[in-house]
Amino acid sequence: MLDIRAIREDPDRLRASQRARGESPDVVDDLLAADEARRGALAEFERLRAEQKNLSKEIAQASGDDKQALLDKAKELAAEVKSAEAAADEAQARLDELAMVPSNIVIDGVPAGGEDDYVVFREVGDRPQLDQVRDHLDLGESLGAIDSARGAKVSGSRFYFLTGPGAQLELGLLNLAMNTAIEAGFVPMITPTLVRPEVMSGTGFLGAHADEVYRLERDDLYLVGTSEVSLAGYHSDEIVDVSAGPLRYAGWSACYRREAGSHGKDTRGIIRVHQFHKVEMFSYCSVEESEAEHERLLAWEEQMLAAVELPYRVIDVAAGDLGSSAARKFDCEAWLPSQSRWMEVTSTSNCTTFQARRLGVRERTERGTRPVATLNGTLATTRWIVAILENHQRADGTVAVPTALRPYLGGRELLEPRSREV
RNA sequence: GGAGGCGUCGCCUAGUGGCCUAGGGCGCCCGCCUGCUAAGCGGGUUGAGGUUUACCCCUCUCGCGGGUUCAAAUCCCGCCGCCUCCGCCA
């Protein structure tokens, strides 16, 4: 949802943003018309309602014939008030509906265009020199780390078991991420993975990509695709104090995605799965501070990637590929040797006031309250195991454990193929 | 799943159809007073929207949504949340 008053003042800004995303600028005129209609209807209702209140007070003091005459008049007025209120409510609902349509206004400097129009900021680290490349599933199976076949047997395609060193690797990654976050001053959180419709909708996940989300119809709850959802809802309908700096939370949760539109894509291994774990950073801050905070979230992501010794690049995602709530998004992509391509491993978005406005998260200022900015970013996910196995594989079939993860694997420096099939 | 109780401003609370333009206390903010602090005195202090250069003013907001009524914090219906007890389960 966008600020209708801001659109009234500067409609061209939204038009330009819509064009950059490849979406229609016509919604702007629809919005302005609906806003005008709403204000007209509201003024009429308020006028009648004020009249009714005054009349009511007269009735309380009148008596006899006077009172009866006033009562007759009041009865008529009551009907008028009722219909004026209905009209005002309807006009408000029309505007609300329209206001939910446009995606967030992109920040100046975001590249225009679609999926392939990103800008590469930098490339960090050296890609491994490998004569023979095995992919992560091949490696994971021989190490006894990933069991895809039994995942499918138990739960269907895109499910898996992490076993032995695989399970330890994931726990290690997530703990390393959690510790990194705590050290940086984040409040560690373990979050609900089922949320109410208002929260899911408030974060912007029920728009164009609603098919991605699991829904439990009997209970009217949604399974989150990231703890961003729960953490955004955490302060909903609250006035928070961000005057002393951002409120920072690090959420640990399981994540669920239907992957409805990706049949046949990344079907092998654990790159694209229905359920995984993630540690997510989430910040609430003033809108003025949001761009600096975005850079900081990116820096913490890069710190994690450096800690697990992965080669990666950072891209500035183009407007058309942002998702509805983001005003800017930076992705880190790790090198994927088996496919000679880059694979998204982190994503950090500045949602400016888009989510906060829908969820009612405000801050106090000298002149009333206003929505804060919300930002999120990935510190580690199950998918990182893919990049770690592939980039740290060695010719003898072993996989080197990055130094930072060794404490979580009992000090082991190498993962070795198991001798016995299980 | 069953029974009962509760939901009013940041917190505590008053309020049983018109005197509520929601009162009081605590906390907080501003001022006065005062060697300092405390106390005392005066004022301010829910949020959303409309109107306005601004001040003012107006409407909505007593968990949420309906209804009754000229008029609802107050009466009726539905829902949600919390608490207590019982049952069932891990």
Image (tube, rainbow, N blue to C red):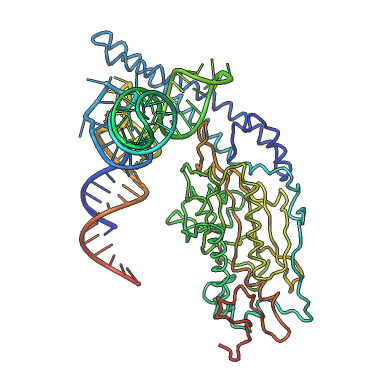
- Quadrant of residue A83 within the rendered picture: top left
- Residue closer to the observer: A20 or A180: A180
Q: Position of residue A25 (x, y in %)?
A: 70, 37
**Above or below A285: residue A64:** above
- Quadrant of residue A414 within the rendered picture: bottom right
Which residue is most to the top?
A65
Image quarter in which the N terminus of chain A is found: top right
**Above or below A101: residue A36:** above
**Above or below A88: residue A165:** below
**Above or below B69: residue A389:** below
Q: Position of residue A159 (x, y in %)?
A: 57, 71
Q: Position of residue A22 (x, y in %)?
A: 73, 45
- Residue closer to the observer: A299 or B83: A299
- Quadrant of residue A161 within the rendered picture: bottom right
Judge from the rendering whether residue A361 lies leftward or rightward of residue A391; answer left or right.
left
Judge from the rendering whether residue A356 lies leftward or rightward of residue A393; answer left or right.
left
Number of marks drawn? 0
- Residue closer to the observer: A226 or B44: B44
Q: Position of residue B42 (x, y in %)?
A: 34, 22
Q: Residue at x 55, y 80 (%)?
A: A410
Image quarter in which the C terminus of chain A is found: bottom right
